[in-house]
Image: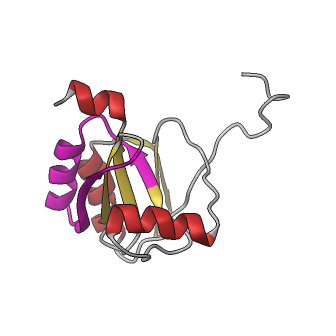
Amino acid sequence: MSTLNNPILEMRVALTASDYERLVKFYCAGLGLEPAAIWNNGDGKAMMLDMGHATLELFDEEQARLIDALEAGRRLSGQVRLALQVPDLNAAIERLLAHGATLVHEPVTTPWGDRNVRMQDPDGMQVTLFQAAAQSQENA
């Protein structure tokens, strides 16, 4: 990939946890991720998880209202919401619920054919899990 055509080489989202171990368990065990890097500095702890291909979505308030209404029935996400594509939505929901997720709304099929579910991590971060339309048909 040429850096001339894409001046950003990597995007990282940093979450500060009120209970670090709980959030590590949620994202590692809940999503089946292994740490890509671990940093322990004195009493501080940090971990990097490889989340695959990353994009940044920018929404205006109207689009945020539309997506929240579709996925959760009403406007409720904050300024930041994670959206993670998973290969098997039902399996991901089960794993995350077992690791402290709160189900915000039952899964929905979007107008574009994806299956989405809105959840919340143990610290309150809104997380959309989605299974692409082609994957949804394969797993049906």
Residue at the image point whose x is 56% and y is 42% from the top: 54
* Residue 26 versus residue 120 in the image, above or below: above
Position of the N terminus by quadrant: top right
Residue 80 versus residue 107: which sits nearer the camera? 107
* Residue 74 versus residue 81 in the image, above or below: below
Residue 57, position as x, y percentages in the image: 60, 53
Q: Is residue 49 left or right of residue 28?
A: right
The residues colored magenta run: 83-111
Q: Is residue 83 left or right of residue 118?
A: right
Residue 36 versus residue 109: which sits nearer the camera? 109
* Residue 25 versus residue 135 in the image, above or below: below
Residue 46 in view:
no
Which residue appears farthest toward the front when viewing the image? Answer: 111
Position of the C terminus by quadrant: top left
Residue at the image point whose x is 26% and y is 33% from the top: 136
Q: Is residue 75 left or right of residue 28?
A: right
Residue at the image point whose x is 29% and y is 47% from the top: 31
Residue at the image point whose x is 35% and y is 61% from the top: 71
Residue 2 in view:
yes
Residue 103, position as x, y percentages in the image: 22, 66
Residue 22, position as x, y percentages in the image: 28, 67
Residue 72 falls inside the magenta stretch: no
Residue 84 falls inside the magenta stretch: yes
What colour scheme does the image use? secondary structure
